[in-house]
Amino acid sequence: MRHSRTWLATALSLLVIIGSPQDVTAGAKSSPELARHLAGIATLAQASPIVTVPAGPFLLGSKRVDDDPYGNWTQFDNTELPQHRVWLDRYEIDRDEVSLGEYLAFLQQQKLHPSDELQKLIWHVITIHSVSDQTLSRWPALYVTWTEAKDLCAAKHKRLPTEAEWEKAARGPDGGLFPWGKADPDQTLAMFGQHHMHEIPILAAVDSHDAGKSPYGLHHTAGNVAEWVQDWFGFDYYAYMPERNPPGPTSGRYKSVRGGSWKSNQIMLRTATRGGSAPDQRSPAIGFRCAQSPVQEETPTVVK
């Protein structure tokens, strides 16, 4: 059957996100030629436009639907239950994932070298696949730890979105199955289902795939790279979370990761799909985007 699944398939899909922690130390100093490319990619960095998500309720999570091929997934994944409405105050979130250009520019500002994995990837796609600095600058950031993602957002006077903020921005107020609606995913809507024998990421520009935008206009909340969010991952958090501006659990082992990636299958692209990863993990399948609370305007004091 097209969407048939087993517990083993579920576990393997989650491992794509959770995985095992990799070496988190800073990378070695780049060769002069690679360093020139890294500097060039950083120079081409472009900040994402900002989207405002209005205050109000939205439908979070999933419910068991025995005759729905996608709903059957929740028979094995109670982390998405129960489905209920949650209220969020107004907030702002980046339309696009943070780009590789922005990430490299941030590392340069911090006088840090990219991880060895990222340096090897960039050198490989430049020398073997003739990928240009311009193209790489519009790739999403990858091989980035949760702490680096948090720090980059802070440097922009932003923060990582909460898990609830991410989900509302991805699915809209009425609990859309996918960011674009109910249609089955295809390559015009999302970058997913890609496989390379050497695990080379197959990525799209952060501002591409307009047909797959979310109701609020966000790109790639399904596929491309999965995304770090602020929260610790709570397996049963949906069952006891507050109904207004849930901040996430106060502690945990994994940080929440949302959105599926370039190598995910269709089911992992659902807006309700949840996963987690060790915060010090570097993965070719995890990136991030930033959010912020709107600045509260002070009421002027009237002097009589």
Image (tube, rainbow, N blue to C red):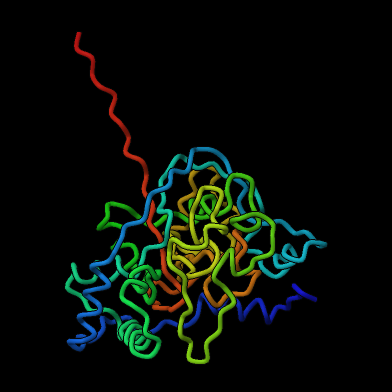
Position of residue 289 relative to residue 111, above or below, is above
Residue 118: percent from left, percent from top: 34, 82
Residue at 58% x, 52% y is 171
Residue 1: percent from left, percent from top: 80, 76
- Which residue is situated farthest in the top direction here? 304
Position of residue 269 relative to residue 290, above or below, is below
Corner quadrant of residue 192: bottom right
* Total residue callouts: 0
Q: Nearer the viewer, residue 75 or 134?
A: 134
Residue at 37% x, 51% y is 49
Corner quadrant of residue 90: top left
Q: Nearer the viewer, residue 43 or 152?
A: 43
Residue at 59% x, 69% y is 187
Residue at 28% x, 82% y is 25
Residue 269: percent from left, percent from top: 60, 66
Corner quadrant of residue 110: bottom left
Position of residue 25 relative to residue 245, above or below, is below
Residue 254: percent from left, percent from top: 46, 70
Instruction: Left or right? Give the position of 287 relative to 14.
Output: left
Position of residue 113 relative to residue 62, above or below, is below
Quadrant location of the C terminus in the rendered image = top left
Q: Nearer the viewer, residue 6 or 126?
A: 126
Instruction: Left or right? Give the position of 151 relative to 69.
Output: left
